[in-house]
Image (spheres, rainbow, N blue to C red):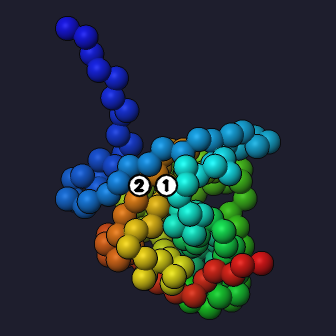
Amino acid sequence: MAKHHKTEKTLVEKMLDKAGITYVPYEFPTEEVGDVAQLEVDHLDVPEHQIYKTLVLTGNKTGPVVGVVPLDRHVDYKKLSKVSGNRKVGMVPLKDLVKTTGYEHGANTPIGIHERHKYPIFISQEAENQQQMIVSAGKVGRSVGIDPKVLADFVDAQFADIATQD
C-alpha cells in the first residue's frame, strides 16, 4: 500500500493541538541570507502586517524578554524597555540565540519559548484587533495563523505599544 507524504507537524503545532487551540498552518518559501535562513519577500499574498516576527532581547533587569511585532515594523527598544520594567534592552546576539531560546534565527516562536522558558512576552498592540496573526511554528518557513487573544492567553503575553515603523 502506498504511503501518502504528509508534512510532519512541528512541536508548536502539536502543543496547540494538545491544548485544543485552533490554528491555520502556513508554509512560506525561505532563502539563505548570509548564514541565516529567512522568509522570502513573497509571502504567498499574505500581508506582511499579518505575519509577526518573534524577537528575543535581553533586559538589564529582567534578562531575556520577547517582542512580537509585524514583519513590516521594528521593535522600539525604549517602549519595550518601559513596558518590561527594564532601563534598557538589546537584541540577544545571534551566536547566543539557540542557547537562549532553543530556536535558530527565523524559527523563534512565542509558543515554544514560553513552553521552555517563561520569559516575559509582549505582542505589538495592533495584533489585538486582528482576526488572525501569523507566528513561527518553531521551524524556518513554517508558521501558524492564530487568534491573537488566544495566543496571548496561551503564552501569558500582554499587548503593548512596542513597534515602530523606522
Q: Is residue 108 above or below residue 76?
A: above
The label on residue 144 is 2
Q: Quadrant of residue 144?
A: bottom left
User: As shown in the figure, which amino acid type bears the numbered disc 2?
Assistant: Val
Q: Is residue 50 above or below residue 124?
A: above
In percent of width and height, residue 7 lies at 37, 32
Q: Residue at left 35%, top 77%?
A: 149
| Marker count (numbered) | 2
The label on residue 136 is 1
Q: Earlier in the sequence, mark 1 or mark 2?
A: 1
Q: Residue at left 43%, top 76%?
A: 130
In percent of width and height, residue 135 lies at 48, 60
Q: Residues within 10 Å of mark 1 (few under 14, many from 20)?
A: many
Q: Which one is in front, 29 or 81?
A: 29
Q: Residue at left 31%, top 72%?
A: 150
In percent of width and height, residue 4 lies at 29, 20
The answer to whether marks 1 and 2 mark residues whose Cβ atoms lie closer than 8 Å is: yes
Q: In this view of the protein, can residue 46 be seen by the observer?
A: yes
Under tag 2, what secondary structure? strand
Report how far apart the C-alphas of labels 1 and 2 lie in the structure: 6 Å
Side of 64 where 111 appears, left or right: left
Quarter in which the N terminus is drawn: top left
Side of 138 where 60 appears, left or right: right
Q: Quadrant of residue 141?
A: top right
The label on residue 162 is none
Quarter in which the C terminus is drawn: bottom right
User: As shown in the figure, which amino acid type bears the numbered disc 1?
Assistant: Ser
Q: Residues within 10 Å of mark 2 (few under 14, many from 20)?
A: many
Side of 108 where 158 appears, left or right: left
Q: Residue at left 34%, top 49%?
A: 13
